[in-house]
Image (tube, rainbow, N blue to C red):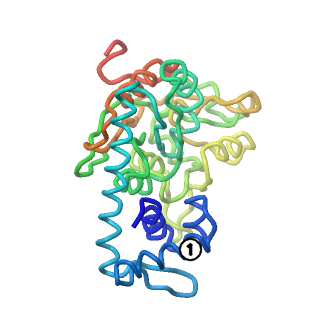
């Protein structure tokens, strides 16, 4: 067996589809199919059950694929140890972030990190917390930026900063000139929220349960309208569709943003989230993690409170 074959079966177990697995491994589907079949013949067992639209690991395949993941991670560790001997910050870093952090942090983080660690290019993934957790555990990502709580055996979690939430309303809204509002005030409004699966939606609903009224089928008014991303929601607010709650780093955007059509209002007692950096205990490049931490502290995130103070 070869490292390439191990990568193929790990990718196939993840994607459950030969075409997608081949694409993820940057090879043709026939190449991957032949390699998997060759490995099965060498081992004398069937690793995958094939169906028309999906493949799934067999019980013994699950055990072998898990071992293959560990072998590949150990091989990466050997390479990283060798790179560290030359330069602790040399080599690609695979970092993930949830959808409500990545678009607002990475534009600031990447230039700073490129200046402090120019030989450490980033592979960036944005996804839901559940998927990032999976990728981190499987070794597909080296570190992830998520919101707490984030508890996982074998994973180190480092709190970075606390980020307050703010309210965005249309410029013509009655609240546009207000100094602050309370979470209870939102119960009278049509509140635009992210869809299910986004942890930020859960955080907003926890802070303001009345923002989501009973379904219309039960005789209530549906007070929440869903959007696919924070950027989409910002434009819906600008159009007059309703109001929304945003993490403070998302309240401003690029030059084409709808800032002139909206107003930002602080909460009188702002709910907030704690953003953290997480990585596997076995990840062999602590200098890379520290470089990311320092770069995040150097970002111009004026609305957040860094854990441990600005100089920590």
Q: Which residue is drawn at 60% across and 50% down?
A: 190
Q: Which residue is drawn at 48% across and 58% down?
A: 197
Q: Which residue is drawn at 29% across and 20% down?
A: 308
**Image quadrant where one finds the C terminus:** top left
Q: Is residue 265 above or below residue 61?
A: above
Q: In this view, does 271 lie above or below 229?
A: above
Tag 1 residue: 18
Query: Where residue 230 sits in the image (x, y, percent)?
Result: 60, 44
Q: Residue at x 53, y 33 (%)?
A: 121
Q: What element carries label 1?
A: helix
Q: Quarter-wise, where is residue 293 in the image?
A: top left
Query: Where residue 281 sits in the image (x, y, percent)?
Result: 25, 42
User: Quick check: can you spot residue 210?
Assistant: no
Q: Nearer the viewer, residue 213 or 150?
A: 150
Q: In this view, does 132 lie above or below 1?
A: above
Near mark 1 (Cα within 10 A), the count class, few <14, some 14-19 or many ≥20, is many
In the image, taking residue 3 as reference, residue 229 lies left or right, namely right
Query: Where residue 301 sits in the image (x, y, percent)?
Result: 50, 22
């Amino acid at each position: 067996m070869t490292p390439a074959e191990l990568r193929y079966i790990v990718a196939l177990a993840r994607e459950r589809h030969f075409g997608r697995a081949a694409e993820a491994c940057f090879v043709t589907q026939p190449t991957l199919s032949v390699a998997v079949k060759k490995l099965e013949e060498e081992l004398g067992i069937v690793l995958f059950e094939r169906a028309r639209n999906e493949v799934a690991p067999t019980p013994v395949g699950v055990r072998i694929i898990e071992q293959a993941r560990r072998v590949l991670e150990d091989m990466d560790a050997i390479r990283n140890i060798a790179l560290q001997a030359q330069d602790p910050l040399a080599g690609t870093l695979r970092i993930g972030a949830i959808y409500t952090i990545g678009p607002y942090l990475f534009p600031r983080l990447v230039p700073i990190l490129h200046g402090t660690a120019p030989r450490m290019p980033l592979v960036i993934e944005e996804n839901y917390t559940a998927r990032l957790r999976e990728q981190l555990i499987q070794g597909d990502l080296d570190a992830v930026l998520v919101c707490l709580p984030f508890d996982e055996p074998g994973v180190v979690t480092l709190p970075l900063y606390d980020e307050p939430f703010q309210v965005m309303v249309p410029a013509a809204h009655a609240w546009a000139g207000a100094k602050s509002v309370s979470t209870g005030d939102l119960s009278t409004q049509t509140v635009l929220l992210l869809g299910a699966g986004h942890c930020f939606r859960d955080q907003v609903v926890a802070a303001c349960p009345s923002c989501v009224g009973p379904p219309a089928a039960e005789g209530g008014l549906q007070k929440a309208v869903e959007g696919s991303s924070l950027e989409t929601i910002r434009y819906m607010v600008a159009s007059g569709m309703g109001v929304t709650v945003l993490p403070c780093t998302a309240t401003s955007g690029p030059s084409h943003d709808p800032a002139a059509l909206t107003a930002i209002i602080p909460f009188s007692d702002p709910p907030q989230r704690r953003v953290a950096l997480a990585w596997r205990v076995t990840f062999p490049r602590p200098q890379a993690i520290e470089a990311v931490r320092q770069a995040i502290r150097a970002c111009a995130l004026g609305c957040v409170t860094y854990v441990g103070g600005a100089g920590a």
